[in-house]
Amino acid sequence: MNYLRNPSIYFIIIAIAFVLHSFHFKFVCDDAFISFRYAKNFINGHGLVWNIGEQPPVEGYTNFLWVIVISLFMKMGFEPVMFSKILGIFFGLWCVFLTYLFSEIILQRKSFLNLIAPVILTCSSPFAIWSTGGLETQMFTFFTLAAGIIYLYEIQHNKITSLSAILFALASLTRPEGVLIFGVTCLHRFFHLLLMKRSLFCRKTLIWLLTFIIIYFIYFYWRFNYYGFIFPNTYYAKTGGGLHQLWRGCIYLKRFILFTKWPILTGLSFLSLFTSSRSILIYLLMLTISFSVYIVYIGGDFMKMFRFFVPILPLMAILVQEGIISLNQWFSRLINRPFVKISVIACCSFIFIISLTMEFTATLKGRKHPPRGRKQVARGGIARGKWLRQHASPDETVAALAIGAISYYSELNTIDRFGITDIHIANTKMPHVGKGVPGHEKHNLSYILSRKPT
């Protein structure tokens, strides 16, 4: 029976539960087909373009590295819809594992309590759902989490290498928000060096900085010369709402907290600031807070299973775990009774079970925009796209609202009526931007009609 004392056995159970949870919600959203279309055009020799031959090319994606990865597997003959799900679950599973490694390697604690964070993450419906959404969400989450863990390990052992910088760069090539994550990390490193009374510009630190800068500069230089804009086209299509956009972002944050509930307990992590691990947990809090502020600033997302919060869910899970452990230690010192430890953990576990059950039940019932509606949108686009492929002339143009699947399967020139993949519409000045659905507010009917769509 000694094997029951091995945490690895329980982690295997957690891993199986995560895979089953993810497959329960398996779907690929329509937006994923935008990336697939860019990948298809790329491997067919047309470049990273939306419409073949269109000039200037438009950057209607914000997941460069994901598009490249998908294109490589498409080149090898893999079908992107199924393979994107497999990749998403693969990276999601690694994220669950990394939350466990964080406790063992960074916090240097070998205990069954290290399983709290993986369990929280496994039970989170948004985390499971966006493991099969067909997008880059989990790959970005993996790179940021892995980079953060290696960074903390490096400063703990004063062995600054380029590995964490490379991973931060890969995260930034996967999503633009990776630059924000690296910027917050630089700020943390700056204060850490000040507190340790070490040189701010030592050779190792400069190499670490230059590694990220060189990798990202090469990508940015190519991107700017290829597309001609500082930001992706999606930025211009989705932003410009001012205070209305900020208010919409606040509502998005409120809905996330009310729906998931358990992140509220990240407040318990402030109890951990009085422990020897405070510098580590301050870093996690810095990342969590700054990323949340960024999400509010951009006005949230129209997909209401909280895709934008997924990259910080592992951080929140770790913070909640450490808050529970600190609360338990605090009560143990206050009330020296054997049952206190079990009681505190049991109460917190009960809270989690209730909140996660409510989250899961709400998702099953179809509230809060679960993948059911996204499946229907994608399936409709697939059917229409295949029909157009068979019946439309190759030189025809189609204008659509949900452009992903219909454009991927029809292979026709496609006009995005919301401007995500259209420079002209994305830069159209619109009144009342920020009051509507994110990414679905800009339009220009006269321009679309001038393109003579089918």
Image: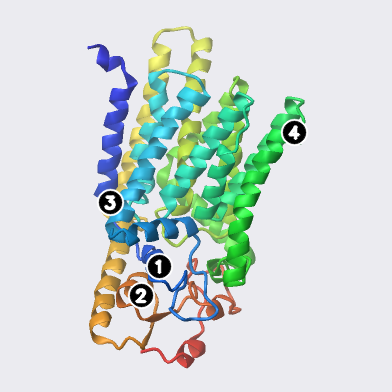
Amino acid identity at mark 1: Ile
Amino acid identity at mark 4: Cys
Observer-nearest of 166 and 6 = 166
Q: Quadrant of residue 68?
A: bottom left
- N-terminal of the pair, mark 1 or mark 2, is 1
Q: At which x and y percent is residue 280?
A: 59, 29
Image: 337 above or below 226: above
**Which numbered disc, 1 or 3, marks the residue closer to the eye?**
1
Looking at the image, do the residues carrying marks 1 and 2 touch, with CB atoms under 8 Å apart? yes
What whole-number distance in Å separates the C-alpha atoms at marks 4 and 1?
44 Å
**Which numbered disc, 4 or 3, marks the residue closer to the eye?**
4
- N-terminal of the pair, mark 4 or mark 3, is 3
What whole-number distance in Å separates the C-alpha atoms at marks 2 and 3?
24 Å
**Which numbered disc, 4 or 1, marks the residue closer to the eye?**
4
Residue matched to label 3? 25
**Which numbered disc, 4 or 2, marks the residue closer to the eye?**
4
Observer-nearest of 68 and 310 = 68
Mark 3 residue element: loop
Residue matched to label 1? 34
Residue matched to label 4? 202
Residue 407: mark in rendering: 2
- Image quadrant where one finds the C terminus: bottom left
Q: At which x and y percent is residue 241?
A: 60, 68
- N-terminal of the pair, mark 2 or mark 3, is 3
* Side of 136 where 107 appears, left or right: right
